[in-house]
Structures are given as structure tokens and as C-alpha cells.
Amino acid sequence: MQRPREIEVNTGFNNTRIMKTGIGAAPGFRIETNYILTGFSIPVSGYNGLGITYIAPSTDSAFYYGKTASGFGGDIPVVGTRTTSILSIGLRFGYEIPQEFNDFLLLHYGFGFSFTRFTTQNVLPEQSTTFNYTAADFDPVTFEKVKDGGMGIEIMVGAVYEFESFSLFGQYSVMLPMVGFDSEDIGLRHGPTVGLFYPLYRLM
């Protein structure tokens, strides 16, 4: 999910309007290897994970300028939509929250560092009384996929419950792009992750 925003856009001839972006959720998956070490406190991290996260394309409101196919007449302002997908590779470190009611439960909070790539693509609106253009009116570059990557930080809180042959886990994390991104439209994302861990080695 992304945080909702209100953006003032100028569609030409001093005609301004407020465009709202939504908080619509997009599904994804995360593959992670980790090392869990219980019974320690700061500065020793009890949850240590290296993972790859992929978020499927989601659609949201967008304002952009489309290049004309002829190259004349200037760019065309478009109030439409844009799809965005996310690929992130990062490290997470979580610190154990002390508790005494269950020896098989690890509660943790922490942070992470990640390289994140956003892939965006403008979507052509349908023709209407306020938008009388077709794909033939635009240079195809207007609707090509654009990739923008950089470094970010993650903040998370979660729990891991150990069973005999696997562990259940759940986390809520916030992904905050920090440096290296060119687009101002790329911003904070957040959401839950649930899944299973299968142990390769257990400390006795």
C-alpha cells in the first residue's frame, strides 16, 4: 500500500485541479533466508534476514505530459493513471522484544537497508468529452516502462512462532526510498507479510 496524497495539477490555460492518489493494495511475495538468535538484547539482533520482495503492478491516479507523435504542438497534459511494480533486495535486522509467556515466540522490531527498483508505465485514458486523443496521437515513448532504482530504508515489527518442523511469521513493514531515485512520484510504501520458515539448521 502507499500513503494517500493530494496533488495540485495544472492541465493548461490556468486550469488547476486536485488529483488524489489512493491507498490501494497490491499483492506480492517475499523470499527470505534468515538467522534467528533468541535470548539476546541490543546490540545483538535476534532476527536477521536477507530477502527479495516483489510487488505486483498496481494502478493509481497520475498526471503526466505525453509527447505528440508529430513532434509539433508541444506536449499534451494527461490526467490519467499509471501502473507501478516494485522489486526490492535488502537486509533486515530485528531486536527481540522480551516476553516470558511463551518460549517458542519471538517478538521483534527493527530496520533494514534495501536496493529498490520501481517500474512505472503510463496508461492511456479512454476517449471522453474531456480527452479526445488516441494512442496514434502520442509518441510510443510516452507509454513505455520506466525503471527507477535507488537505496532505501525499512522499518518493521513482527513475530515468529516456532513449531516442530517449521515456523510461522508475520511482519508489518514500511519501505521508505531515500537516495538515488529520479522521480518525485516514488514514495513510501507499507504493508503486511505473512509466511513460513523452514529451518535448515537448529542450534541445540
Image: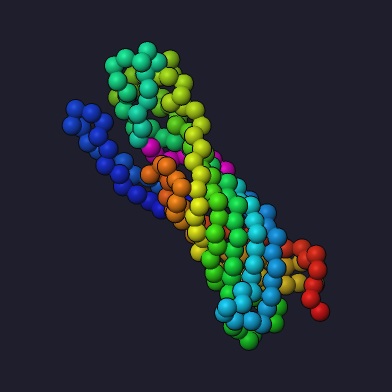
Residue 149: percent from left, percent from top? 51, 44
In front here: 154 or 134? 154
User: Is residue 136 shown left or right of residue 76?
Assistant: right
User: Is residue 104 shown left or right of residue 3?
Assistant: right
Q: Is residue 160 above or below residue 121?
A: below
Secondary structure character of the magenta stretch overall: strand
In front here: 133 or 54? 54
Residue 48: percent from left, percent from top? 64, 67
Q: Is residue 161 above or below residue 135?
A: below
Q: Residue furthest front?
A: 180
- The answer to whether residue 111 of the structure is visible from this angle is yes
In which quadrant of the rendered view does residue 106 lie?
bottom right
Q: Residue furthest top?
A: 70
For the point 50% across and 64% down, the residue is 155
Residue 2: percent from left, percent from top? 44, 51
Residue 187 magenta: no
Residue 186: percent from left, percent from top? 43, 46
In which quadrant of the rendered view does residue 108 lie?
bottom right
**Magenta segment range?**
55-62
In front here: 130 or 167? 167
For the point 66% across and 82% down, the residue is 39
